[in-house]
């Protein structure tokens, strides 16, 4: 039996084991020609991959969509308009119409067993139009742009239409190139104003700066088109097509291409362990897909999933290189470096702001992911805070680290310090081990159901805490934000459903209530060996449900105490993806609410009053929607004056929020003595712990309000116990 199945049985995840076995039977049937559309002797590699993926989606996906003419129309539109030509400035409307008349209603037939003809036909037309678009941008960038005219450009790719003729395509290119040049020209003008008085600074004229800006844009476009001509192959377009099909089922179902050397190298290049993040190329920009907990990027507190890396420089003074149009592999070559060396990156944040960050390259330190705690002294008592960045577990080592056991130890330590309340900080926690979530909730309740897990056909499986003992029964708050997902949502939902504590943070968490597994497309061993010669399908098999019956999918967990959040209106959550699976509910599990539940209304009222009187929270509340609108606004100015006015207002607002956001906390020095002693033998670990403590002292207005809320809970509890 393979390690995969051993781990599944060890986690007591029998439904997933059965699904994998069913997948194996299904693929074996297909090999014999007994499944739908399978077993053709003359199938090409593309046919085999698409047909197998189509069958697997239909047979084992949690909620497969019907593959019919309507589905075919959707895949046709998404593939051409989102994967092949998102800017809609390469293909012409006539090209799309030609493909539409031939293939728009046939893609479902291809998926169900027909010969794959659509992608090769698209490749032929795309290769024909590419040099035409290249000639257009080179001609336009050979002449100066004029930035005094009051005009604008609509860069909303969802609203854009494929150009009817070459003149219309040229105009779309003109406005896009003018805006790209304006962005860089405005930056150069600002740099000139800032540094003009410095000795040795070469002050260029407006004309020279404009020419430099165009040259930079030309370099970016040349780089992009060289990649499209020489590195993007027919296989790449086919892989993108299969992903279009799989992602139409739900955002977390994805196809990974065959594991040959090229694919392996590309995947490995997506990891830059120097700063600890995973990257992806999306339409010529390099976007952060994941952050490694404990890495330099993660510890900076600046990087977020979805940020775009625009520039990279070596050291404090090295030239910042614009990496727009780079492949991930080429971008990583700039970002990686020797351990201890410095790298400088310019990020474009979700709110539209630009931030340049200096990081020291380092190896990822595992202990940064582990649970840790501090004691915060307040005028009304002691509040313990347990920080948990992810629900970690070492399934291969029974003696390895487990978050539930580490949190148990931290609770015991806090109780020894006689804390009056505890905060569990799950902000930015993307999830992890389901087993440990169940164990962790059990530390706070007297046993009972924690979460329900359901596959597409079976009855819900209820995961129970069977230990009737309670390690901690005092006031409890759970901090979350829009990046708290999966296991974090299960924990927060259970605490809320039991009325065991209060959820504090953004209006809702991320909303990922689904479970995925990797299954290889191999015809006999796909369920056991995900890295097959045909590729791998990461497929959604199950869904999480709260014990109250509602799913955590799409809606996430709503906070009891809502704190204004700068990302509140940004489209970052599951609900913002149109292909996300819907929210639904099943019968609730039998459970009893916490017998010491508090009256939420006065605690909410007190928090609301504090927020109204808090300058920074008021500022965030007032400006969050405006800032998001500015960053999402696709109608952009093409005049320098208007561009500078908009940038100045955004920067001023963000600077004001940042300057007001620093709050101080009085941390209990005695409570940290044990941790400091524990780290004495490891100076590096000791320094990391001290840096974490330092950041808590000065930079967290959200923790400050969470402490206030827990203090209100402590007061109410004491009043109840005293009989007042």
Image (spheres, grey):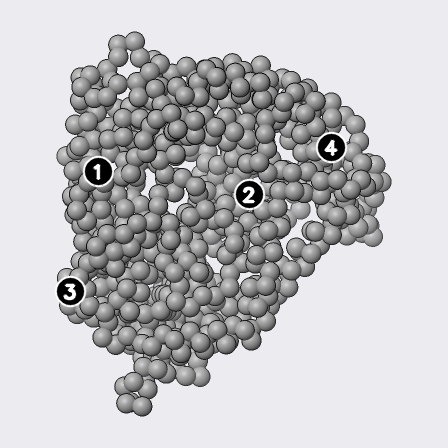
Marks 1 and 3 sit apart, C-alpha to C-alpha, by: 28 Å
Marks 1 and 4 sit apart, C-alpha to C-alpha, by: 53 Å
The label number, if any, that marks residue 4 in the structure image: 1
Question: Residue 676, image x and y in percent?
Answer: 39, 68
Residue 62, compared with residue 477, is above or below; it is above
Q: Quadrant of the C terminus?
A: bottom left
| Residue 464 placement, left or right of 381 | left
Lower sequence index among marks 1 and 3: 1
Residue drawn at x 33%, y 28% is 67
Foreground tag (2 vs 1): 2
Marks 4 and 2 sit apart, C-alpha to C-alpha, by: 21 Å
| Residue 229 placement, left or right of 438 | right
Quadrant of residue 537 in the image? Answer: top left
Q: Which residue is mark 4?
A: 214
The label number, if any, that marks residue 308 in the structure image: 2
Marks 3 and 2 sit apart, C-alpha to C-alpha, by: 46 Å
The label number, if any, that marks residue 467 in the structure image: 3
């Amino acid at each position: 039996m393979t390690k995969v199945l051993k781990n599944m049985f060890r986690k007591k995840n029998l439904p997933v084991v059965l699904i994998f076995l069913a997948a194996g039977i299904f693929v074996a049937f297909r090999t014999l020609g007994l499944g739908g559309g399978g077993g053709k002797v003359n199938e090409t590699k593309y046919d085999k991959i698409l047909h197998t993926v189509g069958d697997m989606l239909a047979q084992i996906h949690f909620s497969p969509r019907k593959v019919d003419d309507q589905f075919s129309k959707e895949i046709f539109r998404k593939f051409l308009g989102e994967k092949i030509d998102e800017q809609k400035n390469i293909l012409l409307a006539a090209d799309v119409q030609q493909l539409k008349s031939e293939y728009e209603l046939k893609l479902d037939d291809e998926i169900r067993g027909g010969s794959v003809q659509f992608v090769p036909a698209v490749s032929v037309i795309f290769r024909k139009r590419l040099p035409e678009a290249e000639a257009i941008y080179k001609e336009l960038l050979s002449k100066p742009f004029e930035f005094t005219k009051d005009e604008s450009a609509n860069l909303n790719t969802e609203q854009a239409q494929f150009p009817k003729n070459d003149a219309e395509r040229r105009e779309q290119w003109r406005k896009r190139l003018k805006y790209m040049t304006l962005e860089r020209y405005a930056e150069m003008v600002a740099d000139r104003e800032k540094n003009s008085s410095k000795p040795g600074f070469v002050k260029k004229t407006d004309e020279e700066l404009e020419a430099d800006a165009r040259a930079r844009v030309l370099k970016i476009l040349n780089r992009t088109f060289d990649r499209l001509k020489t590195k993007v192959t027919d296989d790449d377009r086919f892989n993108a097509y299969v992903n279009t099909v799989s992602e139409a089922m739900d955002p977390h179902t994805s196809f990974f291409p065959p594991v040959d050397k090229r694919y392996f190298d590309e995947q490995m290049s997506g990891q830059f362990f120097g700063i600890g993040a995973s990257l992806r190329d999306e339409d010529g920009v390099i976007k952060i897909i994941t952050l490694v907990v404990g890495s330099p990027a993660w510890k900076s507190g600046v990087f977020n999933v979805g940020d775009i890396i625009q520039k990279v420089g070596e050291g404090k003074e090295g030239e910042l290189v614009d990496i727009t149009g780079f492949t991930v592999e080429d971008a990583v070559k700039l970002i990686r470096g020797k351990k201890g060396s410095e790298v400088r990156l310019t990020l474009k944040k979700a709110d539209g702001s630009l931030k340049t960050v200096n990081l020291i390259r380092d190896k990822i330190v595992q202990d940064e992911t582990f649970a840790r705690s501090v004691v915060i002294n307040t005028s009304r008592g002691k509040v313990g805070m347990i920080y948990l960045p992810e629900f970690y577990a070492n399934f291969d080592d029974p003696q390895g680290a487990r978050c539930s056991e580490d949190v148990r130890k931290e609770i015991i330590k806090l109780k020894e310090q006689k804390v009056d309340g505890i905060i569990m900080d799950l902000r930015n926690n993307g999830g992890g081990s389901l087993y440990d979530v169940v164990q962790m909730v059990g530390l706070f309740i007297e046993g009972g159901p924690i979460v329900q897990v359901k596959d597409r056909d079976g009855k819900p499986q209820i995961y129970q805490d069977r230990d009737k003992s309670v390690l901690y029964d005092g006031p409890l708050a759970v901090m979350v934000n829009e990046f708290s997902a999966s296991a974090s949502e299960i924990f927060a939902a259970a605490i809320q459903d039991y009325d065991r504590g209060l959820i504090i943070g953004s209006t809702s968490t991320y909303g990922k209530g689904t479970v995925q597994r990797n299954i290889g497309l191999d015809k006999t061993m796909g369920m056991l060996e995900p890295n097959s010669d045909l590729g791998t399908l990461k497929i959604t098999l199950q869904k999480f449900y709260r014990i109250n019956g509602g799913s955590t999918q799409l809606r996430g967990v709503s906070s009891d105490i809502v704190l204004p959040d700068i990302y509140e209106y940004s489209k970052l959550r599951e609900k913002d993806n149109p292909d996300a699976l819907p929210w639904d509910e099943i019968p609730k599990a039998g459970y009893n609410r916490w017998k010491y539940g508090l009256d939420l209304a006065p605690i909410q009222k007190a928090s609301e009053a504090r927020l109204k009187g808090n300058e920074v929270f008021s500022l965030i509340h007032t400006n969050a929607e405006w800032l998001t609108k500015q960053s999402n606004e696709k109608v952009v100015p093409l005049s320098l004056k208007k561009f500078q006015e908009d940038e100045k207002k955004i920067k001023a607002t963000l600077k004001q929020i940042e300057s007001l956001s620093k709050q101080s906390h009085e941390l209990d020095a005695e409570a940290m003595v044990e941790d400091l002693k524990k780290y004495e033998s490891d100076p590096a670990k000791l320094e990391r712990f001290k840096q974490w403590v330092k950041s808590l002292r000065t930079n967290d207005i959200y923790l400050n309000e969470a402490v206030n809320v827990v203090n209100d809970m402590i007061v109410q509890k004491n009043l109840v116990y005293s009989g007042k």
